[in-house]
Image: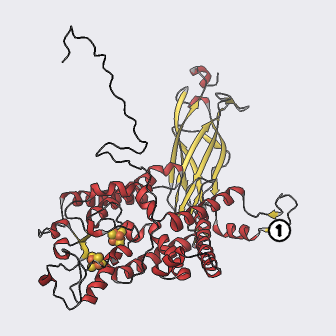
Amino acid sequence: MLNKTSQPSQEKIPVKEIAEDFHPAGVAELDLYQKREKIYTRKIEGFYQRIRLYTGWPLLLGYFLLPWLNWSGSQAVLFDLPKRQFNIFSLTFWPQDFPLLALMMIIAAFALFAVTAWIGRVWCGYTCPQTVWTAIFMWAEQFFEGSRNQRIKRDQGPWSRDKVLRKLGKHGAWIGVALVTGFTFVGYFSPIRDLTQSFMQVGIGSANDSWGLTWGLGWWEIAWINFFTCATYINAGWLREQVCMYMCPYARFQSVMFDKDTLVVSYDASRGENRGPRKKSVIPSEQGLGDCVDCKICVQVCPTGIDIRDGMQFECIDCALCIDGCNSVMDQMGYERGLISYTTENALEGKPTTLFRPRLVAYGVAVLLMMSLFSWAIIVRVPLELDVIRDRDRLYNETTDGLVENSYTLKILNMDQREHSYELTFSGLDHGIIIGKNKVFVAGGEVTELPIRLQIDPSNIPATNTSIVFLIESTDGSDYLATAESRFIGPETPAGRSGE
Ligand code: SF4
Ligand code: SF4
């Protein structure tokens, strides 16, 4: 510690030149960018791959065929943004139905939470579009470029005619799949039959296009098809596991839904260790070995390139490829299957697994309640809406017959997909009459404006400003009804109302 009277030392602190690459002991240079190592996955077959096939194909076919399905004469599933209508089979959702759509999304989110808490990332492994499309792209890669070893060897070797042709074939197939995917996606928003017809009209020799091409498609359609084609090609062809690891938020927060009873793909270290190669004839326990022969098949088949033997990792998408890979090795070695398996942390620790735990029950009850609420809302939902706009130019008119008249414009929105006939009535103004049409047909998904006037003898007007209710009711047996409130304005003085 310095004394108050002490003088600063005149002695200079020696300065030492430090080499640019010097790092103090224990401090390593950390590169925040990790270069991606290309993953060459090995093809594997087995029980879980068959399940992936059986779940993947129906989903793919559903995706590609659904927009071609017609329902009551129009596209069964169409998100018609210009008309602001979402058609899902017999249901049409309008902007007014946003709470229902929001409820649907919340149900889907809770269902995903429940499934994740119960059986882990089964969504990621079997049904996520990223997984399904990546599997198709991998299949194309194997078709054109061969097995894992052949692909590694070819990529390390020089460019040759064979290599160029194989690469061209692979990328051609990827672009083809990506284009059909992007086109189909846009077909959910723009009627797919018209879209296909327009797509076919692309030709050469336009008078009004600087590139000499004619486009049957609109520019926004071209832009979105291109966008989704590129997104599919890049995500499934190039980024693959990086989408799951760095871009998908679900991968980051799914672990909070896990507990010790969640079913996840796990390696049984107590059985597998000590790992090591051995001859088939060797009895592992006699050599101090576990059942893992350290063949690394589980790593080679993993689409995210991780080693499940290192424990549970956020990169693992629960695809079970490593289970099939390891089981095939266990079969070859004559060992019991299941060194890697779907199991729970409790089971691995020799404790019982509880299926009905509070969190899972809470998720299940929440999903059931919301689904009941949603179903009820759909059942009681009336696909009809009525709006009334009162003519504000004049408070009221007096006719030559001495009647008091108010004008209105009624907007009738038929939210159903079928045409309906309606009849208009009103209440709150006894002895009043409607001048104009009070019966109307409205086509499915259309809005009709109905201008009408209400007339009444002034002596029958109950007040200067009277509350009235318009009621529109279907007359074709569909039993739809909608009401809208408005006002009838009359003369200010009772004398005026009596016509004096
Ligand atoms: S596949 Fe099975 S035996 Fe081979 S390294 Fe992986 S865990 Fe061990
Ligand atoms: S560790 Fe196994 S289950 Fe997880 S992603 Fe890799 S192969 Fe799939």
10 to the left or right of 452 = left
Residue 346 % position (x, y): 16, 66
- The residue at 77%/69% (across/down) is 201
Question: In the rendered image, which quarter is residue 157 located in?
Answer: bottom right
Residue found farthest to the bottom: 281
- The residue at 21%/68% (across/down) is 344
Name above or below for residue 329 compared with residue 438. Answer: below
Name above or below for residue 397 compared with residue 32. Answer: above
- The residue at 18%/61% (across/down) is 357
285 to the left or right of 16 = left
130 to the left or right of 392 = left
Residue found farthest to the right: 207
Quadrant showing the C terminus: top right
Label 1: state its secondary structure. strand
Question: In the rendered image, which quarter is residue 208 located in?
Answer: bottom right
Residue 355 % position (x, y): 19, 67
Name above or below for residue 270 compared with residue 247. Answer: below
Tell me the crowding category of disc 1: few under 14, some 14 to 19, or many 20 or more residues within 10 angstroms, Cα based.
few
Q: Amino acid at mark 1?
A: Ile
Q: Nearer the viewer, residue 48 or 158?
A: 158
Residue at image mark 1: 204
Residue 38 % position (x, y): 47, 67
Residue 196 seen:
yes
Quadrant showing the N terminus: top left
- The residue at 35%/73% (across/down) is 299
Note whether ligand 2 is within 8 Å of mark 1: no
